[in-house]
Amino acid sequence: MKWFWILALIGMSVSCYTQKIEKAFDEDFVAADSNRIINDYCRSCHLHRDFDSAGHIEEKSLLYKRKVFRYATECRTCHYLEKQFSLNDFTRKTRRPDEANQGKFKEFELEILKAQRAKEN
C-alpha cells in the first residue's frame, strides 16, 4: 500500500509539471514566467543542460526575416507543443527560420499581430 501512495505522488507531480509546461506554451502565463518555465524545461534535457536562453534569442532572431519572429521576445513565438493524444504526451516543435522566411506560418503571424494590436488598444 505504501508503494501505491509513492507512485501516486510521483504521477501527480509529473502531471503538474506537464500541465505547467503546456500552459506556458498556451499563453496562460505572462511572458517572463512562460520563458522561465520553458527554459527550465529545455535545460532538464541532458542535450540542453547548458542552454543560454538570452544568447539563444539574440542569436536566432537574426536568422528570421519576418517581423514577428525577428523581434520575438518569447520562446513560444518560435517553439510550440504538438499534442500526442494516443500517448497522452507532447512533442516540442520549432518554427524554423527557413520555413518562416518562406511565409509558411502566415496564419500564425497574423494571430500574433492581432493580439499585439489588441493589447495596444
Image: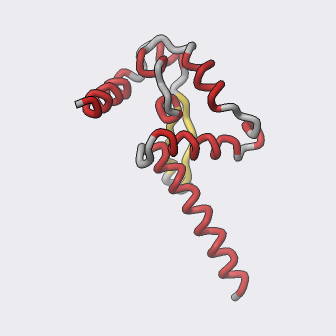
- Vertically, is 121 above or below 102? below
- Vertically, is 72 above or below 91? above
Give percent across and percent down for residue 55.
65, 25
Q: Quadrant of residue 6?
A: bottom right
Give percent across and percent down for residue 71.
46, 20
Quadrant containing the C terminus is top left
**Lateral position of residue 82 relative to residue 50, left or right:** left
Give percent across and percent down for residue 119.
29, 33
> What is the residue that sits farthest to the left in this orientation?
121
Quadrant containing the N terminus is bottom right
Give percent across and percent down for residue 92.
57, 39
Residue at 37% over, 24% down: 109
Residue at 32% over, 29% down: 116
- Vertically, is 67 above or below 6? above
Q: How is the image coloured?
A: secondary structure
**Lateral position of residue 56 relative to residue 118, left or right:** right
- Vertically, is 55 above or below 34? above
Q: Nearer the viewer, residue 33 or 76?
A: 33
Residue at 54% over, 22% down: 96
